[in-house]
Amino acid sequence: MNRKIRSIHLSLLSAALLSASLLTAPAHAQLAPAAQPAPQAGTTAEARRANIVIIGTGGTIADAGASATNTAAYQSAVVPVDKIIASVPEISKVANVKGEQIFQIGSESFNNERLLKLGKRVSELLKQPDVDGIVITHGTDTIEETSYFLNLTLKSDKPVVVVGSMRPGTALGADGSLNLYDAVLVASNPASRGKGTLVVLNDEIQTGRDVTKSNTFKTETFRSPFGPLGYVVEGRTLYYRLPARPHTVQTEFDIDRIDSLPEVAVVYAYGNVNPASIDAAVKNGAKAIVYAATGNGSVGDYMVEPLKAARAKGVQIVRASRTGSGVVIRNGEQPDDKYDWIVTDDQLPQKARILMALALTRTNDPKALQQIFWKY
């Protein structure tokens, strides 16, 4: 019993002595500084020494409006990439960057030839040991098509990030500078390797496969039915999910081996759609037609025969949906097996065009083409 009392007394005495020492110690010595946490993945410190090439292709991020209040009306693709980089000096704290102008166009002017030229140049740069990642400034109108194309054809696990803006740099609330800064952060981060081609806007990291533009003027226009891969927050790159479908080094499509793309047409369905649109695509040399149908790839009764006739001439027919998301079911709305047609799975018509063009460089067998759509 006495030992317990003595132990209590000693504990109380120690506490009193500690309190007294704190009261008499200098203010700066009262509390030891808290241990600093280890840097988290995605911090600026990690990315600072990366070598990033920023390729300029034009788009709104290179635009200028007549006044600061012009956010949706402006002159397209007038600011060179080096000037865009210079306008964001904070980038130099993140990575060693250099600019290269390959196009100066609105992205609605991208065609197969320009797509191939861009892809081949990116591939060349990725092979250089002193290049750690690529950022591509791009107009938002077709950013989803270019990013999907690169996602399928580049043979490197180095980060490739496509970035744009919804407002010109001259506008109040311009989003281009922060988008570009975030894109360089993402491209500089080792955690971005092996995730395919990425699209960075509005603090979000999207996969090139899934992302689409959903609004004509809002800065949060880019959406994926599955959500972003992650965010860029206060200079940190934060990932929360991974791409599920094969990309880049996992695909059979190699940009270095592709010198041309076959013509693939997209025909948009609507009430009273003119069957002559199918004939026009065939006459213009289409090797495949992506039919952007209503609902779950529904084809009006008066459009079935024109599509069957096109297939009889060797043109591949791909049923897609104009709805913006969802899976087109094979042998659902139409007897695809009977008609020898293909369905897109969940891919949007404009992206189905990209995949079909690439697939036709490998095979013309409709069964093999269908497997490609289910795979990618």
Image (spheres, rainbow, N blue to C red):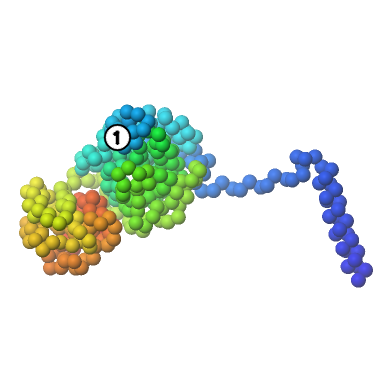
Which quadrant holds residue 53?
top left
Q: In this view, does 233 lie to the left or right of 321?
A: right
Q: Position of residue 355 (x, y in %)?
A: 24, 53
Residue 14 in sight in this render:
yes
Name which residue type carries label 1: Ala
Direction from residue 238 to residue 154 in the image, left or right: left
> In the rendered image of this protein, does residue 307 appear above or below residue 178?
below
Residue 323, compared with residue 200, is above or below; it is below
Q: Position of residue 138 (x, y in %)?
A: 31, 39
The N terminus sits in image quarter: bottom right
Residue 209: x, y in percent? 32, 52
| 226 left or right, relative to 106 | right
Please state the horizontal and vertical placement of residue 133, each as a whole percent of the image: 40, 41
Q: Which residue position is annotated with label 1? A: 73
Residue at 28 percent of width and 43 percent of height: 141
Secondary structure under tag 1 reads loop
| Nearer the observer, 168 or 62 | 168
Structural crowding at the residue carrying mark 1, measured as other residues with C-alpha within 10 Å and reported as few (<14), some (14–19) or many (≥20): some
Among the 4 quarters of the image, the one containing residue 319:
bottom left
Quadrant containing the C terminus in the rendered view: bottom left
Residue at the spot 84% in from the left edge and 46% down from the top edge? 21
Q: Would residue 111 be found to the left or right of residue 231 on screen?
A: left
Q: Between residues 143 and 45, which one lies in front from this camera angle?
A: 143
Q: Residue at x 88, y 63 (%)?
A: 7
Q: Is residue 126 visible?
A: no
Q: Which residue lies furthest to the bottom in this view?
A: 1
Q: Residue at x 21, y 51 (%)?
A: 353
Q: In which quarter of the image is residue 337?
A: bottom left
How many numbered marks does the figure carry? 1
